[in-house]
Amino acid sequence: MTRKERDFLRQRKEIMLTALTLFSEKGFSSVSMQEIAQKSEFAVGTLYKFFPTKDALYGEILKEKVMELHSLLIEALNIRGNEIKKLKTFVERKIQWFKQNIDYVRLYVTETIGMGFINKDELNQIKEKIHNELIFEIRRLFKSGIEKKLFKEIDPYLLALSFNGIANGFIFEMIDNKEIQKINPDIILDIFLNSVSLKGLQ
């Protein structure tokens, strides 16, 4: 990239990080573009060159965070090791990401529903696409594990949906439950995999 392109990406990232911090601290509706500009030390006009509206800025933050988590989880499902190790890594990294981004997650849960940012349809399409990709990868692991006699012969698609659903259930409960925040990923594996594993957790 040219220096100009690098500067563009750096400034865009700085604005998005500042906006995310302010949105998390005060709530979306309580933060203005002027405040974001002041906090990020950019002119208001500069912000509007990157993002035409506050809704558009928020939409880009959501999209980037969704893609960040997706990349992390796909990588976890493709590490070296057997299927159980990969599933364990998936849960560990998912919990770790949510703990590190707890303010963002709270913001997403409390603010996003009903908002009209300009690329909401695009975000929904991205979320659907990456959800399907994630379930496909988890299904692939269960299918492989069944063939290796690690898991009982249950529809791997249903196993993938159930496993991801249980992990998500714990994680979203974790948002405001400090006891759940201390959870060891092995507990999720124990609850789920011990019921479908032929050889026990390895």
Image: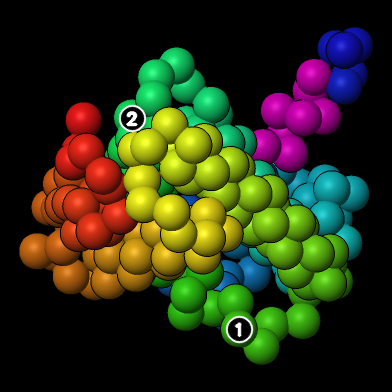
Q: Quadrant of the C terminus?
A: top left
Residue 42: percent from the left, percent from the top?
A: 70, 43
Q: Residue at x 87, y 12 (%)?
A: 1
Which corner quadrant of the image does residue 41 belong to? top right
Which corner quadrant of the image does residue 131 belong to? bottom right
Give the class, few, some or many, for how many residues have Cα within 10 Å of label 1's Cα (few <14, many ≥20): few
- Residue most toward the bottom? 114
Up/down of 151 relative to 104, above or below: above
Up/down of 2 relative to 81, above or below: above
Which amino acid, by three-letter code, is at mark 2? Lys
- Classify mark 2: helix, strand or loop: helix
Q: Earlier in the sequence, mark 1 or mark 2?
A: 2
- Name the residue tied to disc 1: 113
Residue 5: percent from the left, percent from the top?
A: 87, 22
Residue 120: percent from the left, percent from the top?
A: 78, 71
- Name the residue tied to disc 2: 85
Q: Residue 11 in magenta? A: yes
Q: Residue at x 35, y 65 (%)?
A: 166
In-front residue for pair 199/24: 199
Which portion, as a residue range, is magenta?
6-14
Which amino acid, by three-letter code, is at mark 1? Ile
- Classify mark 1: helix, strand or loop: loop
